[in-house]
Image: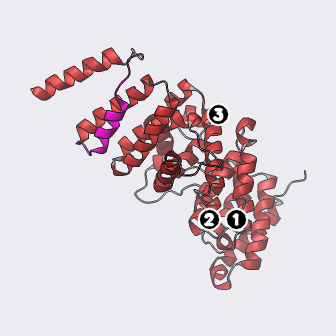
Amino acid sequence: KTQVKLMQLLSHLNKRLRPRKEIPLPLSALVSKLRSSPGPMQRNFLLVYIKMAFDHEVDNAIKEKYIFQLLEISSSLPRANILSIISLFFLQLPHITLPRVPKNDDEEFEFKVKVFKERKELLLPLLLNALLLDKEAWKSGSGPGLSYDSTAELMKGGGLSEVEQKFSLITLKKAIVKLLDTLLSLSVYENYELLPHAIVAINDTISSVSDPATSFYKQTNTKSLTHTPTVKSLFSLLLGNEKEKGRKDTELRLAVSVRCRISIIEQLTKSEVALNTFPQSLQLTYSCLFGTDSTQKLKEATLKYLFWMFKLTKTKLLTPFAPLLLQALLKFLKEGRIVAP
């Protein structure tokens, strides 16, 4: 009975407080309470009021201070609660300040860097998905490089539908590029960790996103990519996810755009790790030579990849796949797949 009365009271408070944005909420106390590991129901209510407190707060410096505290706390929270915090992070992202040359003994700066490092596994995939999102994916629920589930997670859980109401997807993408460029210059992240993000950003169809990404891309453009997880990440973007037993259709990630695929192949061609990765190299060959959306430039990039693969791949790895690769090349030559410019 007490719980029912409490729910009614909180519901009444919500209705009264939400439209009255001139009334400040105790953001510090709410965040402190969340840090004390409350139960599921209390935690959910706290996040509702924290979000309302952010909406009522007009000082971006205060909101920035608490968003990093919330990101730190999120390591102990369930995924749904984490996404509530990510939605606040996305809304605050265009206002986040991170100096390229920090002051000595700047505790606030050090705390931000600490959070970015500790929550890397959470933030980097979400930021990559946000960069992949475009207007078409916004309408259809999926798009190049994304799955229906990852898009829904961004739009609903990650609050990107609200982002569009506050500013725009383009503004968010520009803020992501600026942030990652700064984090890279500060050596918070390694260049190979951000290479997928840079490739996606520089191939964005909106010039106000792709142009600022040029310097960011140059920083990540490694001469020889030796980091295996990054190589696998690039292959995943290039090929998408195949249907596997137990995997739902909504979890299947589509391949990225042709423009992105060309850039990815150019990077993989310089990587001996990639050239010795199978069966992905075989899948790359067939997908990019014979795919329904393949272009002349994509085919030429694939042939260059094959040249270096035959030159540098270890014999014991190449031998089992050699007949299939030869078959692909013979089919390609027979069909006259390269067209005149």
Q: Distance between the residues labelled 2 and 3?
A: 28 Å
User: Are dots 1 and 2 in contact, CB under 8 Å?
Assistant: yes
Residue 164 or 264: which is nearer the viewer? Answer: 164
Which residue carries the number 3 mark? 170
Q: Can residue 293 be seen in this view?
A: no
Label 3 or label 1, whichever lies nearer to me, is 3
Could you tell me which quadrant the N terminus lies in? top left
Which residue is painted at 70% across and 42% down in the image?
A: 204
Amino acid bearing label 1: Leu
Cα distance between the residues tagged 3 and 1: 28 Å
For residue 124, side relative to residue 197 (left or right)? left
Q: What stretch is highlighted in magenta?
A: 23-39
Q: List the residue tagged with mark 1.
A: 268
Q: Is residue 269 left or right of residue 241?
A: right
Q: Which amino acid does label 2 sit on?
A: Val
Disc 2 vs disc 3: Cβ atoms closer than 8 Å? no
Q: Name the residue under label 2.
A: 231
